[in-house]
Structure formats: C-alpha cells, structure tokens
Amino acid sequence: MKKNYLFPHQFRLIGWVLAIVAVAGYIWGPDIQFRMPSLYFDVLFDDENESGFFRMARTNTLSLAMPLLIIGLLFIGFSKEKVEDEFVHYLRAQSLIWATYVTSALFIIATLLIYGIAYLYVPYLVFYVFLILFIIKFRIELRRFNKGGAQ
C-alpha cells in the first residue's frame, strides 16, 4: 500500500501567503498588543483575579506569527509538485536527510558556542532552520534536475 503524506499542490501558494504574513508579523508585530486565551500554570505571575487553567493573556502578534510561519513552511516544503514522480520523491528524501545533517551540525555547534540566556533561542530556531534548509535544498536540486544538470 502506497501512502502519500504530501499536501495538494495548491497548498504551496497558501504556504507562501502564510509565510509572508508571518514574516510581516515578526517585523511589525511586536508593537501590536492584544489578549488571547492561554493555558495558565503559574500562579506566581498572576496579575488577574481569574481562576482556572484557561486565562486571557496579554501578548503580541509574535504569538500568532510563530505558528503561521511553521504552517507556511510545512505547506511550501511538503506540497506535491505538478509532476510528482519517483525521482521527485527521491530528491525530497535526499533533501530531508541533508537538512537533518546540516541542522544537527548547526545545533551542536550552537550548543558548544552559545551560553546563557542567548541559548534559549537556539532550540526555538532549530525547527525553522530545518524547514528553510530543506526547502532551499529541495528547490535547488529540483531546478538542477529540470534544467538537465542532475548528478
């Protein structure tokens, strides 16, 4: 039984729109504040007189930009091509393996070289870097193949 876990081809455009909106949210969003429901586990920082696990938290658009960027990158990277054949599957698999190796190496290097509070950003950025590297590698290999320069 052959399973295909890829999104339909049209999701790539949706992914680009979500990624662009997310990047705009990263750039201009920290100044825009709003309240949204959140899980609340820590009573030490209770500035509201609410009770229960779900509370309204003050946040900015970065809280929405992060998941939007991940969803957008997933749609871009894992949408079917117009012609989805076995060689495209092979390129996708090779790009995933390459992105895993490079991201792991970058994570190890960052772990050895970055300390303190700055290190808290490293695990957060690893997933984004992985998806971006995968997309770049896959697109480069696919373009190379389509131009007739496949290895």
Image (cartoon, rainbow, N blue to C red):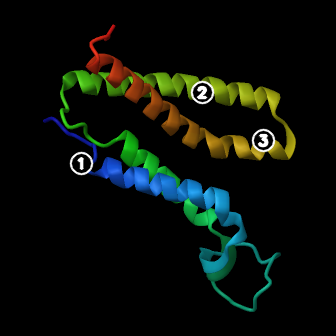
User: What x and y, as percent, mark residue 14?
Assistant: 35, 55
Which numbered marker is on residue 104? 2
Secondary structure, mark 2, is helix
The amino acid marked with disc number 3 is Tyr
Neighbour tally class for label 3: few under 14, some 14-19, many 20 plus, Cα within 10 Å? some
Q: At 54% across and 22% down in the image, what residue appears?
A: 101
Local packing at callout 1 (Cα closer than 10 Å; few below 14, some 14-19, many 20+) is few
Quadrant of the snapshot with the N terminus: top left
Question: Residue at the location (67% across, 78% down)?
Answer: 57
For this orientation, the residue located farthest to the left is: 1
Please tell me whether mark 1 sits on a helix, a strand or a loop.
loop
Task: Report x, y in % for residue 53.
Answer: 62, 80
As measured in the structure, the alpha-carbon distance from the residue carrying label 1 to the one carrying label 3 is 37 Å
Residue 89 occupies which quadrant of the picture?
top left
Which image quarter: residue 45?
bottom right
Q: Is residue 66 visible?
A: no
Q: Which numbered marker is on residue 8?
A: 1
Q: Are marks 1 and 3 in contact (CB under 8 Å)?
A: no
Labels 2 and 3: the sequence-earlier one = 2
Q: Residue furthest top?
A: 151
Q: Mark 3 or mark 1, which is nearer the start of the sequence? A: 1
Dot 3: element? helix
**Extreme residue toward the right, this view:** 116
Is residue 119 toward the left or the right of residue 14 in the image? right
- Around disc 2, counting alpha carbons within 10 Å, would you say few (fewer than 14), some (14 to 19), or many (20 or more)? some
Asked if residue 150 is positioned above or below residue 88 in the image, the reply reads: above
Residue 7 lies left or right of residue 67; in this view the side is left
Residue at image mark 3: 119
Three-letter residue code for mark 1: Pro
- For marks 1 and 2, give the one nearer the viewer: 1
Given residues 146 and 7, the one toward you in this image is 146
